[in-house]
Image (cartoon, rainbow, N blue to C red):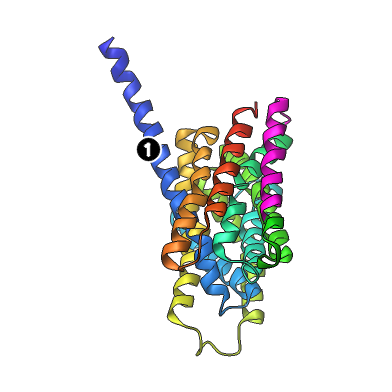
């Protein structure tokens, strides 16, 4: 019995490490929307998107060269392109555009749908047949988000809400494709190669979309750009994919459900944005729906 227990310890330690790495990744991602909200007040959304991808891409290239990683196989290029479209370009650009119309606290409610979007694309990509209860929770969660957006009346922006929904969809696709690809390519290597793949275009657009002068850009805006470039776009994914590899994609993926809570807390404390009880209630309800849908996804 004692020998069996000793044999299980390494696996237990690996699982614990996976949860810890995954939690660190989620905490890093949670600050992305508040930081983007600060940056987009002074940077053009398109420039912010291409600049953060360029900075992260250069760092990723250095990491790949430093660790002498092998180049992806030809059949892995299309999945990497999907990852790049989803998490390198799509989600950052759409959220930056959305945050011109809505607060980061409002946008974080939509992040509660991200695990669901990831699960749906995982089902489509994996060909699984989820139970009918899965679709019940999926539809209910979507209706809660739409109902919340409608209930805001003139205080919310339909354009901002639509952009956030599109951002969640493309990010869910990028997460699902990246999780599938990480099984063969490696965890942090997926986001690194996706960044490098998009680097030439992003760098070129950074030059063309750069503002005429940076003299009026404040320190908080620069710090926000640095955060979303280094942490949200690269370091967060290093911890996130490492956690998925160590603790399992399905298990550690549940930590995404904590992201809205962390994000709302940051929006309230750092940006002094109002977080209503209704907003918290919808976030909790959406998270419960996502948890139920995930539970019955197989």
Whether residue 83 sits left or right of residue 66 in the image: it is right
Tell me which corner region of the image, top left, top right, bottom left or bottom right, holds residue 292: top right
Q: Which residue is mark 1?
A: 17
Query: Quadrant of the image for the C terminus?
Result: top right
Question: Toward the viewer: 21 or 70?
Answer: 21
Question: Farthest residue toward the top?
Answer: 1
Tell me which corner region of the image, top left, top right, bottom left or bottom right, holds residue 293: top right
Whether residue 33 sits left or right of residue 4 in the image: it is right
* Dot 1: element: helix
Question: Toward the viewer: 8 or 145?
Answer: 145
Asked whether residue 130 appears in the rendered view, the answer is no
Secondary structure mostly seen in the magenta stretch:
helix
Query: Quadrant of the image for the N terminus?
Result: top left
Q: How many marks?
A: 1
The image position of residue 133, as x and y in percent, is: 69, 27
The image position of residue 84, as x and y in percent, is: 65, 56
Tell me which corner region of the image, top left, top right, bottom left or bottom right, holds residue 76: top right
Q: Is residue 245 magenta?
A: no
Does 96 sit above or below residue 109?
A: below
Does 32 sit above or below residue 295?
A: below
Does 122 sit above or below residue 108?
A: above
The image position of residue 212, as x and y in percent, is: 60, 89
Q: Residue at x 44, y 48 (%)?
A: 239
Q: Which residues are magenta?
A: 127-148
Question: Toward the viewer: 27 or 239?
Answer: 27
Mark 1 surroundings: few (<14), some (14-19) or many (≥20) residues within 10 A:
some
Asked whether residue 217 appears in the rendered view, the answer is yes
Does 170 sit above or below residue 184?
A: below
């Amino acid at each position: 019995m004692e020998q069996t227990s000793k044999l299980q310890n390494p696996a237990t330690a690996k699982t614990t490490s996976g949860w810890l790495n995954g939690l660190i990744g989620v905490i890093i991602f949670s600050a992305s929307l508040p930081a983007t909200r600060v940056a987009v007040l002074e940077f053009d959304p398109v420039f912010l998107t291409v600049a953060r991808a360029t900075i992260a891409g250069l760092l990723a290239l250095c990491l790949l060269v430093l660790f002498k990683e092998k180049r992806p196989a030809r059949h892995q290029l299309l999945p990497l392109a999907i990852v790049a479209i989803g998490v390198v370009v799509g989600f950052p650009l759409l959220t930056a555009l959305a945050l011109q119309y809505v607060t980061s606290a409002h946008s974080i409610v939509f992040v509660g749908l991200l695990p669901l979007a990831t699960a749906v694309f995982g089902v489509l990509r994996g060909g699984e047949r989820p139970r009918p209860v899965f679709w019940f929770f999926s539809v209910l969660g979507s209706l809660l988000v739409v109902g919340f957006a409608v209930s805001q009346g003139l205080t919310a922006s339909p354009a901002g809400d639509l952009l956030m929904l599109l951002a969640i969809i493309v990010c869910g696709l990028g997460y699902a494709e990246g999780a599938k690809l990480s099984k063969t390519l490696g965890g942090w290597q997926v986001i690194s190669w996706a960044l490098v793949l998009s680097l030439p275009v992003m760098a070129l657009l950074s030059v063309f979309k750069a503002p005429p002068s940076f003299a009026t850009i404040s320190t908080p805006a620069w710090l926000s750009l640095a955060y979303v470039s280094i942490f949200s776009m690269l370091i967060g994914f290093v911890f996130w994919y490492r956690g998925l590899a160590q603790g399992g994609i399905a298990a550690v993926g549940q930590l995404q459900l904590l992201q809205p809570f962390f994000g709302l807390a940051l929006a309230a404390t750092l940006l002094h944005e109002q977080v209503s009880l209704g907003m918290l209630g919808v976030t909790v309800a959406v998270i419960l729906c996502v948890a139920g849908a995930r539970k019955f996804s197989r």
